[in-house]
Image (cartoon, rainbow, N blue to C red):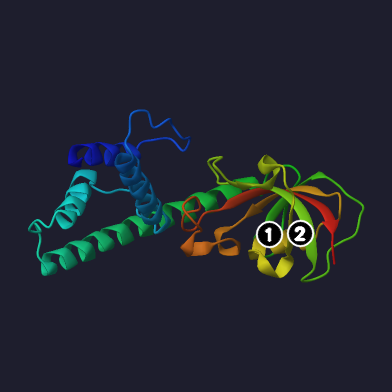
Amino acid sequence: MKKVFFALFLLSLSLPAAAVEPVGLSVSERYSYAMGVRLGQLLKQQGIEQLDSKAFAAAIDDVLLGRALRLDADQMVSAIREQQQAFSQQRDQRAQLNEEAGREFLARNAKESGVVVLPSGLQYRVLEAGKGAQPAEGGKVRVHYHGTLLDGTVFDSSTDRGEPVEFSLVSVIPGFRESISRMRVGDHWQVFIPSELAYGLDGAGTKIGPNETLIFEIELLEVIE
C-alpha cells in the first residue's frame, strides 16, 4: 500500500485536469489519491506551486505509521520560515516583472489606433458601439466578458461558458467598474486595466499574479437597475 500511495501521490502532481479511469485501483488506493488531490488543491490555493513530492509523501507516511520524524520541531519551524522567505522573494520578483511588463505594454498600446486613454490610466477600444441605456453609478448590469493576461492566458470568461453574468458595479474591480459605467447597452469594448485598477499586488486566485495588467472584452447586454 505504501509504494502504491507514493506512486499515486507523484502521479497526482502531473495529471491533467480531465479525469482518467481508475483501472485496477482498490478503494484504498482511490481514497489515498483523492486525499492527495484535495491536499494539493488546498496548497495551490495558498499559492504553493512546488514541493519536493518524495519528502512530502515520506513525511505523511512517517506520521501515519508512527515512525520517528526526521526533523525536530525547531528544525521544521526553521525550514518553513526559510521557505516562506524564498516564496516571498520569488513573489516580489514576479510582481516587479509583471509591473514592468504592464507599464511597457500600456505605453505601446496607448499609441495604437482607436485606443482611448483615461486619466485613471484605464485604456479601451470600441469594437462595436451600442445606443442603449447607460448604467447608473452603483447600478446592476448584465454582461458578457472574456478576461486574459498579457500573454493571452484566459483567467475567466463568461463568453466561453456561454452564460452572461449579472452584478452590481460596486462589487467589481475599479477598472471593470469604470469601463462599464461609461458603456451603453450594445457596446462591445476591449478594455486594458492597469494592475492598480485590477487586483494590484495581491493578485487573485492561482491565475492572476501580483501586479498583473488585465485585458477584457466586455459586452454590455442589459442595465438591470
Q: Position of residue 30 (x, y in %)?
A: 35, 40
Question: Residue drawn 68% across and 59% down?
Answer: 176
Amino acid identity at mark 1: Phe
As drawn, the residue found furthest toward the right would be 131
In which image quadrant can residue 15 be found? top left
Q: Quadrant of the C terminus?
A: bottom right
Amino acid identity at mark 2: Ile
Pointer 2 with pointer 1, Cβ within 8 A: yes
Neighbour class for label 2 at 10 Å: few (<14), some, many (≥20)?
A: many
As drawn, the residue found furthest toward the front would be 27
Relative to 4, 39 lies left or right: right
User: Which mark, by number, is residue 176?
Assistant: 1
Q: Quadrant of the N terminus?
A: top left
Q: Which residue is mark 2?
A: 180
Question: Residue drawn 30% across and 40% down?
Answer: 29
User: Which mark, by number, is residue 85?
Assistant: none
Q: Position of residue 140 (x, y in %)?
A: 79, 65
SS at mark 2?
Answer: helix
SS at mark 1?
Answer: helix
On screen, residue 180 above or below 19 = below
- Front residue of 81 and 149: 81
Q: Position of residue 14 (x, y in %)?
A: 35, 36
On screen, residue 4 above or below 140 = above
- Front residue of 216 and 160: 160
On screen, residue 163 above or below 119 = above
- Front residue of 185 and 45: 45
- Front residue of 120 and 183: 183
Q: Is residue 13 visible?
A: no
Q: Position of residue 221 (x, y in %)?
A: 83, 51
Relative to 156, 21 lies left or right: left
